[in-house]
Amino acid sequence: MEFRSEDQAWLAQFVLDELGIVIGEGKGSLLQARLLPVIRQFELDGPTELMKSLRVLRQVEVRRAVLDAMTTNETSFFRDPQSFDSLRERVLPELLEARRAERALTIWVAASSSGQEAYSLAMLLQEVIPDLAAWRVRIVATDISSAMLERTRQGVYSQYEVNRGMPAPLLVKHFERRGAKWAVKEDLRKMVEVREYNLVRPTSPAPRADLVLLRNVLIYFDLPTRHQILDRARAALRPDGYLVVSRTESLLEGRDLFEPAFGGSGGIFSPLRTSPAGRLAS
Ligand SMILES: C[S@@+](CC[C@H](N)C(=O)[O-])C[C@H]1O[C@@H](n2cnc3c(N)ncnc32)[C@H](O)[C@@H]1O
């Protein structure tokens, strides 16, 4: 039940081409661990039959399942609480003041995994916008993994998942029991729009946004790809908007596109007005 080295190389290239994700050293065991469940799911004989489905028959469902399996979907509610503190105390107050006349705010959660990040934001917005009903607030959650997008649409989480990062009062306020699980209440679910978006090879325009969250995903890509993604994020952002990355990312690869905001803490960045080519940001 092992992939031949030629198949490993083909798979690594397939994942690089489709997702931009670089599979480095030790790919044999990684591919093995991630793809055995796919082999079982489609009741295939083993790696050889999987490779045939991918390369010869080009079966769309199998290709999609393989790509899904190669994504890392680790996430949690209010992950990296200091970033949420910065959003609550500095970024959102400023943006809400700037958008007071139009009463509209769009937040793009790129690489949203199973939805905890988007719903954390929805809870935060309910807290900081007392007259929320008078605003048009959109949280657009995108990812490449169809399984993760479906989970976000459902908004149903296990006890373990809600225990990770969610303060108990918020669980009681925004979730209802569904058997052994917890479902996001309808008012919160309606704030989140879910759609597929490949950061590396987008086939549709990115949402025009006041705030873009691009957290814990750039690490999977090589430097030129990161730069392209950041360039597109900058183009999607309104000039006075903000980009949030994970607090551990310096964003050195995008220093011609963004500059640290609020003293550089919390992973918050502002778009620079001129691009490397010198054209003005829209
Ligand atoms: C580690 S999770 C991060 C989730 C969330 N942003 C957070 O910080 O908790 C990385 C996500 O990136 C997604 N991803 C990987 N490659 C992608 C691509 N090319 N386009 C869009 N999403 C991608 C994965 O499917 C996964 O859900």
Image (tube, rainbow, N blue to C red):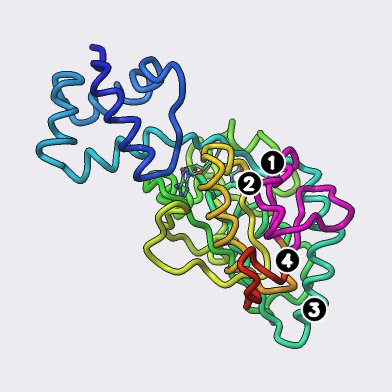
Residue at disc 3, secondary structure: helix
Q: Is mark 2 within 8 Å of ligand 1?
A: yes
For disc 3, the marked residue is 98
Please tell me whether mark 1 or mark 4 is closer to you in this view. Answer: 4
As drawn, is 177 to the left or to the right of 202? Answer: right
Q: Nearer the viewer, mark 2 or mark 1?
A: 2
Amino acid tagged 2: Arg
Q: Position of residue 171 (x, y in %)?
A: 67, 46
Secondary-structure class at tag 1 = loop
CA–CA distance in space, label 1 to label 4: 27 Å
Over which residues does the magenta segment extend? 243-270
Instruction: Say what amino acid the circle numbered 4 marks.
Output: Leu
Separation of residues labelled 2 and 3 (CA atoms): 24 Å
Quadrant where the image shows the N terminus: top left
Relative to 214, say whether 220 is above or below.
above
Bin the neighbour count of mark 3 within 10 Å (Cα to Cα): few under 14, some 14-19, many 20 and up.
Answer: few
Label 2 or label 1, whichever comes before in sequence order: 1
Give the CA separation, mark 2 to mark 1: 10 Å
Could you tell me which residue is drawn at 58 percent across and 68 percent down? 236
Question: Which residue does the numbered mark 4 point to in the structure image?
Answer: 272
Say whether disc 3 or disc 4 marks the residue closer to the N-terminus: 3
- What residue is shown with label 2? 215
In the image, residue 239 sits, relative to residue 270, either above or below, namely below
Q: Which residue is mark 1?
A: 79
Q: Which circle's residue, 1 or 3, is located before the other in the chain?
A: 1
